[in-house]
Image (cartoon, rainbow, N blue to C red):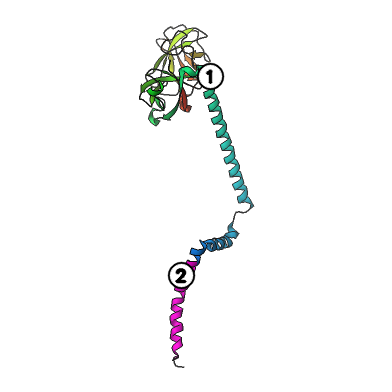
Amino acid sequence: MGASLWPGNGRWRALGRVAPWLALLLGLLMVRLSKGAGFADAYALFSRPFWPGPAQREWVSSAASLEDQARLSLLEQDNQRLRDLLELQRNTGADSTVAAAVISRQPRGWWQQLELGKGSLNGIRNADAVLGPGGLVGRVQSVTPTTARVRLLTAPGSEVGVWLPRSRRHGLLVGLGTHRPQLRFIDKDLDVRAGDLVSTSPASTLLPPNVPVGVIQSVDERAVPAPRAVVQLIAAPEAIDWVQVRID
């Protein structure tokens, strides 16, 4: 049978070639006018069989519960930290101290120094004592108008004279660059044991007197030329984010 000679066939053939493009333009126009709502509904319809079942919902619920517990724990820790700060300020006296936030620490010098967000404009000076929750943590090493650098008791070369109230003995607390400094004595025969409190001297003029520093963890009685002890600081340097600077 011969090809059709009807002129209308050519028009339908041309319209068939253009129809997909017209449909595409129409679809884009509908997406534009509906802001994608139709596609979202279609996606939800086709993806419904793959939505989480009971087991997945239980996992999601368990994860949400763990997240809530973690947030509660962090809030409790923050609340305790603020309570410690208030207690520290109450014990040291608000008129003679400046509260300052720790704004910077160097990973390589974690046990050596920290930077405070207050400086000479707030009355902070070199050699001022720096206290954390529980006791002494170091002394101011350098000051700018708005910042202060603190040398920690754990810094290598740090030396601070301390006092043992129970045995009434003096010693030298030396930083080793670790989280526990070393206490060195002059006398060979000492009444010192683990658990003894270490504080600043009651007669100290360079540091506030009778400020807690740490607790003796162990004693090496065979050390030469005199016994030595390892001290656990009460105010843990690794966990400090706020301090009080004694400015009197």
First of labels 2, 1 by sequence position: 2
Q: Residue at x 44, y 28 (%)?
A: 102
The image position of residue 223, as x and y in percent, is 42, 13
Q: Nearer the viewer, residue 64 or 177?
A: 64
Instruction: Using the rendered image of the protein, determine whether residue 16 is visible from the camera's viewpoint.
Output: yes
Answer yes or no: do the residues labelled 2 and 1 have beta carbons within 8 Å? no
Crowdedness near tag 1: few (<14), some (14–19) or many (≥20) residues, C-alpha within 10 Å: few
Q: Which of 208 and 99 is in front in this view?
A: 99
The secondary element bearing badge 1 is classed as: helix
Give the residue at the far bottom of this rendering: 1
Give above or below for 180 relative to 71: above
Residue type, mark 1 in image: Arg
The image position of residue 201, as x and y in percent, is 46, 10
- Disc 2: which residue: 25
Q: Which residue is drawn at 46% across and 73% down?
A: 22
Q: Nearer the viewer, residue 16 or 49?
A: 16
Q: What stretch is highlighted in magenta?
A: 1-29
* Image-based side of 71 in relation to 99, left or right: right
Residue type, mark 2 in image: Leu
Give above or below for 48 relative to 108: below
Most common secondary structure along the magenta stretch: helix
- Disc 1: which residue: 90
The image position of residue 242, as x and y in percent, is 47, 26
Instruction: Using the rendered image of the protein, determine whether residue 216 is visible from the camera's viewpoint.
Output: no
* Image-based side of 138 in relation to 71, left or right: left
The image position of residue 24, as x and y in percent, is 46, 70
Real-space CA distance between mark 2 and mark 1, rounded to the nearest whole angstrom: 74 Å
* Image-based side of 144 in relation to 166, left or right: left
